[in-house]
Image (cartoon, rainbow, N blue to C red):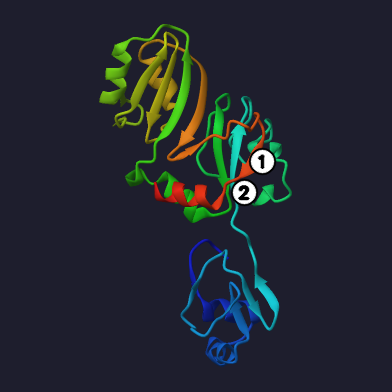
Amino acid sequence: MSSSKSRLDRFISRQVGIKRGDVRSILAQGRVLVDGHVARDIAQQIDQFSHVTFDGRSLQAQQALYVMLNKPAAVVSATKDAEHTTVIDILQRDDREQLHIAGRLDFNSTGLLLLSNDGDWSRQLSLPERQIAKVYTVTVAQPLNTDYVAAFAAGMYFEYEDITTRPAQLSIVSDYVAEVSLCEGRYHQIKRMFGRFQNEVLTLHRHRIGSLDLDVSLAPGESRDLSQTEVAKLAGC
């Protein structure tokens, strides 16, 4: 079943192999449960994570998964790759093949990466109008100055895409370290923005997405499930 919602009668008809017109009487007999409750309405909306049983037999019981990974360097943000280790490869969990990546990190970038089997949730995180900030710690080769702050705040024109980046916030932490917050994810965006100053990015580490901070107890390559509170806060930020 896809991540979109479906009417209960349509779902039961498809799963059990009966006519949709016969579903009404089945529901009236209390033979169908949705998330543990007797379902009576043929038009009830269910999604891919609704637990549906018919005469005690489970028709659907997929669990929503939301995972935080501390991505190490030299790992590809992909589910499959013929040449390199992927983030799926390093996950130590039996259900890893169900997961997709909700927001990439470059090959040598590190830090907070989210994975899920909930496509709607992942798409919500990437909607431009939601303006969800991603925050990075960046180490560069040449000293920083206030010109960087102004240039990032103004946005930069990328000729290849013919776009101007949205304003980004840059805070100077030390001579060679900055914290950058931005609400979009153009191809190699941070590296290209520092590239305007001929300043090479040496390390790029994402430590926050929206209201969610990377769990500092996670070593590179380690992961954990998000709590229900974390999932809800991130969805609402």
Assess whether mark 2 and mark 1 are in contact (beta carbons under 8 angstroms).
yes
Query: What residue lies at 53% left-to-right and 29% top-to-bottom?
Result: 106
State whether residue 34 is above or below residue 184: below
Of residues 216 and 200, the one drawn nearer to the viewer in this rendering: 216
Query: What residue lies at 48% left-to-right and 55% top-to-bottom?
Result: 120
- Residue type at numbered disc 2: Leu
Q: Mark 1 points at which residue?
A: 88
State whether residue 44 is above or below residue 230: below
| Structural crowding at the residue carrying mark 2, measured as other residues with C-alpha within 10 Å and reported as few (<14), some (14–19) or many (≥20) | some
Label disc, if present, on residue 99 of the rendered structure: 2
Q: Position of residue 153 (x, y in %)?
A: 28, 24
The quadrant in which the N terminus is found is bottom right
- Residue type at numbered disc 1: Ile
Q: Distance between the residues labelled 1 and 2?
A: 8 Å
Q: Where is residue 74 in the image (x, y as percent from the top left)?
A: 63, 25
Q: Where is residue 93 in the image (x, y as percent from the top left)?
A: 72, 46
Q: Is residue 120 left or right of residue 78?
A: left
Of residues 27 and 164, the one drawn nearer to the viewer in this rendering: 27
Label disc, if present, on residue 4 of the rendered structure: none
Which image quarter: residue 149?
Answer: top left
Query: What residue lies at 45% left-to-right and 10% top-to-bottom?
Result: 176
State whether residue 80 is above or below residue 42: above
**SS class of the residue under badge 2?**
loop
Answer whether residue 205 is visible to the viewer in this image.
yes
Answer whether residue 187 is visible to the viewer in this image.
no
**SS class of the residue under badge 1?**
helix
